[in-house]
Amino acid sequence: MTESSCTPGRPGLYAEASHRGVWGERLLAYPICSILAIVWTLFAGKDVPWDALHYHVYAGYSVFNERLTVDLFPAGTLGYLNPYSHVPLYLMVRAGWTSLAIGTSFAMMQSVMLWMTWELARIVCRRQSGNSPGIVVWAAVALALLNPVFLQALGSSFNDVTTGVLALGGYVALAGAFRGGRLQLVALAGILLGAASALKLSNATFALLPAIPMVVGCVSMPRQRVRALLIFALCAGTAVMAVTAPWAMRLERAFGNPFFPMLDGLFRASDAAAPTSHSASSPWQSLGQLITGMRDPRFLPSSLTEALVRPFDMLSARRLIHTEPAAPDLRYAGLMVLAMLGVVARAVRHRREGVPVATSSQSDRAYMCLAISFAASWVFWLSISGNSRYFSPMASIAGVLLVAGLYRLLAPAPQRILIYALTVMLGVQTVFLWQTRDLRWGPQPWGGQWLQVNIPPHLRLEPQLYLPLDSQSQSFLLSWLAPGSAFLGVSSGIGPDGFVGSRARALIDANLSRLRMLKVVREVESDGRPALLDPANIDYPLRRFGLKIDPKHCEYIKYKGNPEVLERAGPDAGSRDEVQLYACRVVPGGRLSPSELDSKRVADQVLDQVEDACVELFGQHRRGSSTRSGNIWRRTYGGDLALWVSDAGSIRFEDLIRGGGDRVVLGRIDDWLMAPQKLNCRRQGGRAYVELVQN
């Protein structure tokens, strides 16, 4: 038998040896990735982000404790999302693990993202001999590790990475299916991507749906492609149902809607809805509201030009480009440049013969389908979110595509050219990372337990109904408060009317003698005592229910937290990283005065007109109820925009995140009541602009 006759079977000759070699490499690669993740976590420090205190801990707590019939919007609408991905955090906190133990445990779990990156790079860079170039594979892992968004979440409680691991594992399975068209790997991919989507909805849009080109491309015959699609859809749907069903059934029993508070118009078991939402007149409108509600305008490009240059904007070490902290990242700009160079190189190679082929045809096909899936995900992402935290699995894929594409592009050149190129690329990304100062969302020093809470003995023993008055719910405290305590999220926009309002009133009436509000202490006197509370500036949500604050009966809850919550503190006020909460008694007797009701009616009328004149900015959250704050009536939109009407008669607008404190005057009440005014509204560079057009 000649050598040429054996050539078609060459991969089979190496299969057994290659299989043994890959497992040996895994036993080395996986521990290295995990050690790197743990080392970074220990260096960067403990991270307790805002979201962990708002709903991460509560979500895990609610899995093991019946809360749906006890609390009401305890963490806003986020308290009703699928909670199972937050179970590890709650179990570790409940067991009293130290901060170091919890941080390193999260780092271990999240380092699997690097494992999957290693696997994916190995598959799409496989040579004809069956092995993969180690320098390319490890360069992809290095790019995944040097991703600032990944590092900021590493060792923290965000579920973007932990659920993203499942999604990326699905892509690894699909890439593996290209070798021999193994449909069992397609089934595995469907299970992993379906589970990831059930645990975090953004994975469905940015990972599950874009995987279809991979499913279709892993086999060659039309009938096989139909079969692969059916298997993938069946397995993904089964996984979604299996992971979603337990929580959905609990929501159904509590509210008559398995997706509460979403899609309530499709069920109509009650008129329940999210506190800030508005009922739809048809199921299709409900679906439209859901899709619209998923859009996050904070990071969306405002024009096609901005969308095209977004990869290059992401090179900048500025905040609020593609996530809240600064997170410069060269992978996406590198992919655009690589795509343009690839087109040129392909045209040149068509005119030449004998150009060496770096990879096998199967890995080439996997690479092309992976690139198509990434492009589809990128378009979805820039159309709906633009927030890189929700793009974690595809971000790792971007690094794989970049280094694998560079490997293919430089195949005819000496290997040292590839080494130089990868070294420069990783060096530049390291410099970008060095420029980043935002290593942690909620930085705290290592030591002690993950959450360090000091509850007054009275509140540990006697159950209360707590009514938080801040945007941060403080729902994590339930694990430390007396058994039987509950949370009612009046600050989330709940009013006394409708189904939600009736449930809120029933909850209040059942606990009328044991009501307490929660409010972050913003000002501390020089001796460390919290400043005297002024109920008039904060009690509007309570007075809507006929309640008022009794400032003479206040206790104080303390925990280690963000020092930035303090706006004023004397020189001897003590540690600034100790957050204090007013926990004052709430009693019947509050009400909205006739003059307040009249001023609210006028403010709502005027703000409705402002929204109609500026649909492009306020249309997604129109017709919300104005809330009282001091001497103004205020509406917020998506957490980053605000309109308000002051008692003095002026109307103002502010971009809360990017506005730099600028407050734009949009005229006066009398002018708007006389005739709707014309506004010039736009987003540019992420910032919202509203200007009154003078007649």
Image (cartoon, rainbow, N blue to C red):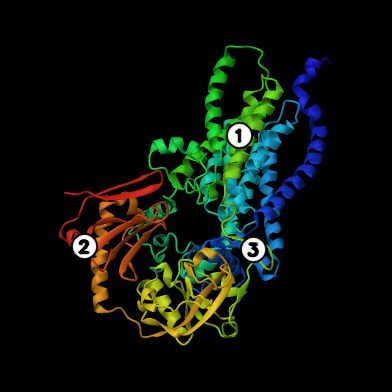
Q: Is residue 453 left or right of residue 597?
A: right
- Position above or below: 344 against 586: above
Q: Secondary structure at mark 3?
A: helix
Judged from the image, the secondary structure of the residue bearing numbered disc 2 is helix
Question: What residue lies at 83% left-to-right and 33% top-to-bottom?
Answer: 17
Instruction: Tell me which label, 2 or 3, sits earlier in the chain.
Output: 3
Q: Are marks 2 and 1 in contact (CB under 8 Å)?
A: no
Three-letter amino acid code at disc 3? Leu
- Classify residue 24 as left or right of residue 681: right
Which class describes the residues within 10 Å of circle 2: few (<14), some (14-19), or many (20+)? Answer: many
- Circle 3 crowding by C-alpha within 10 Å: few under 14, some 14–19, many from 20: many
Report the amino acid beneath label 1. Leu
Q: Which residue is mark 2?
A: 669
Residue named by callout 3: 89
- Distance from label 1 to label 3 (Cα)? 33 Å
On screen, residue 264 above or below 587: above
100 with respect to 570 (left or right) = right
What's the residue type where badge 2 is placed? Ile
Tag 2 and tag 3, C-beta contact below 8 Å:
no
Residue 545 sits in quarter: bottom left
> Which residue extends farthest bottom?
513
Assess whether mark 3 and mark 1 are in contact (beta carbons under 8 angstroms).
Answer: no
Image coords of residue 255 (percent x, y): 46, 69
